Amino acid sequence: MKTSFVETVTIDSGISGTRVLFFGAIHGDELCGPVALRRVVEKLTSGELKLLTGSATFVPVANPKAYASNTREVKENLNRVFKKTVSPNSYEQELANELTSLVDYHDVLLDIHSSFVPAPSHVFVDYPTESNLAFARAL
């Protein structure tokens, strides 16, 4: 699968199962996702953690230009333009085309964001099926 990302890591268990996709830094100034995802990749590749079934694809920095400049966005909020666009007019629209292709291939997406105000951790579940809710509770 062609991507323009510097970091895209897929770990496959070798046993069929759920394909999970992880995004960090959709917004370039959200630094927790890349740290967390790189840590998980390191633990999986070292053998400290083991993927039992399925596969996991990690995109620690989903918005590389914004991340490099520590800004929320380059031109547009990537979350607000996150759909396939026939004729993209911005960097974020081009990223959205690429990222949605990754989403289409996977069964589950976990998109990590950061907050700049003190608050408890929280999870948004777009499709509250029992399996999605169980996944959210496990996090």
Image (cartoon, rainbow, N blue to C red):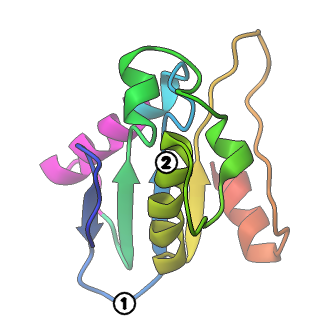
Q: Please identify, in this view, whether the residue under mark 2 or under mark 1 is nearer the observer.
A: 2
Quarter of the picture holding the N terminus: bottom left
Furthest toward the right, the residue is 128
Corner quadrant of residue 86: bottom right
Residue at numbered disc 2: 23
- Does the magenta run of residues contain 127? no
Q: Is residue 46 left or right of residue 37?
A: left
Q: What SS does tag 2 mark?
A: strand
User: Which residue occupies 22% across, 41% down?
Assistant: 42
User: Which residue occupies 23% across, 43% down?
Assistant: 6
User: Which residue occupies 55% across, 63% down?
Assistant: 87
Q: Is residue 47 visible?
A: no
Residue type at numbered disc 1: Ser
Q: Relative to 22, say whether 39 is above or below.
A: above
Residue at numbered disc 1: 16
Q: What SS does tag 1 mark?
A: loop
Q: Position of residue 7 (x, y in %)?
A: 25, 45
The earlier-in-sequence mark between 2 and 1 is 1
From the image, give the main secondary structure of the stretch colored magenta: helix
Q: Position of residue 43 (x, y in %)?
A: 25, 44
Number of numbered tags placed on the structure image = 2
Q: Position of residue 100 (x, y in %)?
A: 54, 66
Query: Magenta segment, which residues?
Result: 35-50
In this orientation, which residue lies closer to the viewer: 96 or 8?
96
